[in-house]
Amino acid sequence: MRKIWIFLLVFITLQLKAQLDSLAHLQYDVRLNDIWGYQDDLGNEYALVGLVDGISIVDVTQPDSIREVFRSKGPNSLWRDIKVYNGFAYVTNESDSGLRIYRIDGLPDVSTVEFKNFMGEGDQIFNTAHNLYIDSSGYAYVVGTDRSDEMIVFDLNANPWSPNEVGFFGANYIHDIYVRKDTAFASAIVEGEIQILDVTEKANIQLLSFHNTEYRQTHNSWLSNDGNYLFTTDEINGAPVEVFDVSDKFDPERVETYKVRQFGDEIAHNVLVNDSLLFIAYYKTGLVLVDCTYPYNLVELAVFDTDKSSKGPGFSGAWGVYPFLKSGHILVSDINNGLYVLKFNPTNIGYLEGNVMDAMTGFPLNNVKYQIIGSSEWDYTPFTGSYSLGQKGGGEIEVVFSAYGYQTDTIRVNLIEDSVHFESLYLQKKNTGEMNFSITGDDGKQLDRVSLTLSQSEFSQEFSTDERGELLLDDLPIGQYEVNVGKWGYRNGCLTISVNEGENRHELQLVSDYFDDFSANQGWISSSVTGDAIWERVTPVASFDNNQGLQYDPSEDGTLEGCNGKAFCTGIDGYKSAESSTVNYTNYIISPEVSVPSIYTDAYLSFKYWSAFQENSEDTLKFGVISENDTVFVEFVSETDPQREWISRGFNLSDAAISSGTFRFIVEISDDLNPWHLVDAAIDDFEVQFISGKEDVNTCFVGQNGIWKSKCGVKNYRILNNLGQIVQAGVSSKFDFSNLNSGVYMLQIEGYAPQKVVVDE
């Protein structure tokens, strides 16, 4: 849950706004990674900045005159991690030379800093490591090593220059780790979980428990001052910072989440805690400060954007943050924009907490939406019915509460700084009515088992009629509902209805046609050769790859008219990157069965598709038919075809050379996996048009000078270009190609086989 606030007046905003101010900035000629800090015996403060080719030590004691005092070249590595203990700096990298140790206790009086490469002892050596943490007792936990992915524990106390290995843990790859006293919190990024370890005996480390983070890309964690709450990040687009109550190490509970933008896809990279503040290196957003006085009620305080040239998902911007200097100054490393020294000007917060309950029963209500009036963001109550939020500076706020089936209610409170105001709310149920649906076909036939979805802003549920097309919904809260109706062999229906108190009845008539815009459930089946099927009938949400920012899923469906909103898509998840929601292996969607009436000899199958292939991939998207035991693919799409837009396409049933009078439409998308590439697709507006063999298109239509005319009356028609895009459509007896660019077009006339038309200059 992301907590929110609102400022009442402009002058209050200026007065109360918590700020992050830049005190100094140092640009580098190379890319940066992580950062740490150090204070010498004289009180001088230093930034230890990780570079792709070494480290940089910068004196930041006087922010108006910061200066680099030492730079060390090392193995080129995108990743470096730095920690300091007793005047020594310990640096990992993922290229070579093991752990590099720098003796920095001589600063600022030395002209150079002595260092050595340390790779372990005897035959227990390692060359690379991803990260490390040094606890308050002087034990270094080096993780993500190339020694079988082991975590190696070194005692730095006896000989910090050549530490002694005292233990290891080799169950899996650990990406990052945080240790306090006898407990370690390991970020197992591959497993997507926080692993809680007992490190009392370094030579016999025990796994106590493990718990998945929401997006299964567990990157780092940090413990609250009291040790009861753990804050975690998942390094993936749109993932929140999560808060776990770890007071019971064997049964942690997720109690809160935070995102800098409620529906944003930015990446929170590293989170650290100092006193009651979260310091989040939030990649392209910069540094984000969040109040965690009450870890179940996080309140955003300030944001400093270190990379104003880029926004959204992906890996650039603020990599690391160090908030522990005695001066209170904050160090931030930006990958492309260098070192920042920041100052935080805090403000106090007023907090609001309470419970939402049913006015009649007193039971807590979950999934109640609550929102500060004037804010664009909101949250929902959990099963306990509790809610919590905060506002910088306190002051008067109005909070609105709404839930399906209940009357909306509002509370107005005056929040006091540094205080918690507790107020419970009892929601009254809405009055109800009864809705009776009756659904028939346009030929008057009763339709059995029709899918009907009823939706409001906080509610959506699919129902099914009985064998007579009847559906009775009693005790339905009054109000307006969006209704989507679907039945195979008919066009989907959609409408808005009002439910009033008492009895209500609505009769719907569906138009006979094999057409599906997927706004309702017509019974398609999705499957995969392995694992869960990735095709889904959903509202499209765009996803982007992390490297080039290319779009891999459509941002809207392909339907221009009628009932729109949904399509069949692969890997739709607005909070994940394309890499995390792409197709893997082979996946299918298959339509229900189509029967070709005996008066027709052929059928034309048309559809819209969206495809997105990674460059140089061998992945494929295929369209075809299944008849009895035969599957024949007719249309093929690859990365050389136009993509990342909705394109119309189709083929004749006769092109599949099947003999049966029944068939099913099939779509296959396949990731070659050798090598793996990104691939996604979607389809919409599937339609079957039957073609009669009694009329020849050339006997009914004549073409001359770019004008085709019908001798058989007015007809529905469409003209498609060679990309399958509709360039003309309507109802007419004349079809004009004369004003189109030269090229090959397809003329589709209702009831006739498609006709190829060549337009010359």
Image (cartoon, rainbow, N blue to C red):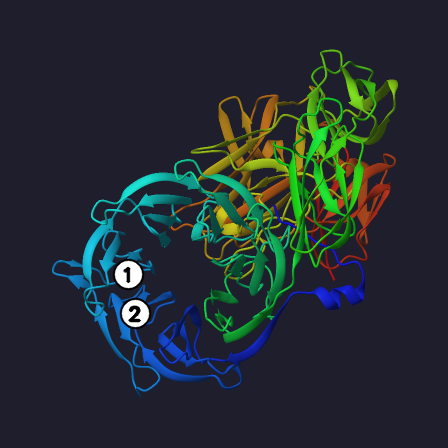
Where is residue 744 shown, x and y percent of the image? 68, 52
Q: Few, some or many C-alpha atoms within 10 Å of disc 1 (few <14, some 14-19, many ≥20)? A: some
- Front residue of this view, candidates 289 and 276: 276
Above or below residue 162? Residue 188 is: above
State the residue position of label 2. Answer: 86
Q: Secondary structure beneath disc 1? A: loop
- Front residue of this view, candidates 680 and 328: 328
Which mark is on residue 408? Answer: none
Where is residue 480 shown, x and y percent of the image? 83, 31
Where is residue 265 shown, x and y percent of the image? 59, 54
- Which mark is first along the chain, 2 or 1? 2
Quarter holding residue 715: top right
State the residue position of label 1. Answer: 138
Above or below residue 614? Residue 443 is: above
Q: How many marks?
A: 2
User: Do the residues under discs 1 and 2 have CB atoms within 8 angstroms?
Assistant: yes
Residue type at numbered disc 1: Gly
Q: Quadrant of the C terminus?
A: bottom right
- Front residue of this view, candidates 567 and 326: 326
Residue 450 lies left or right of residue 254; in this view the side is right
Residue 678 lies left or right of residue 405; in this view the side is left
Where is residue 281 shown, x and y percent of the image? 51, 62
Q: Residue at x 56, y 24 (%)?
A: 659
Residue 722 lies left or right of residue 270; in this view the side is right
Residue 725 lies left or right of residue 498; in this view the side is left
Q: Residue at x 81, y 56 (%)?
A: 738
Residue type at numbered disc 2: Asn
Residue 539 visible: no
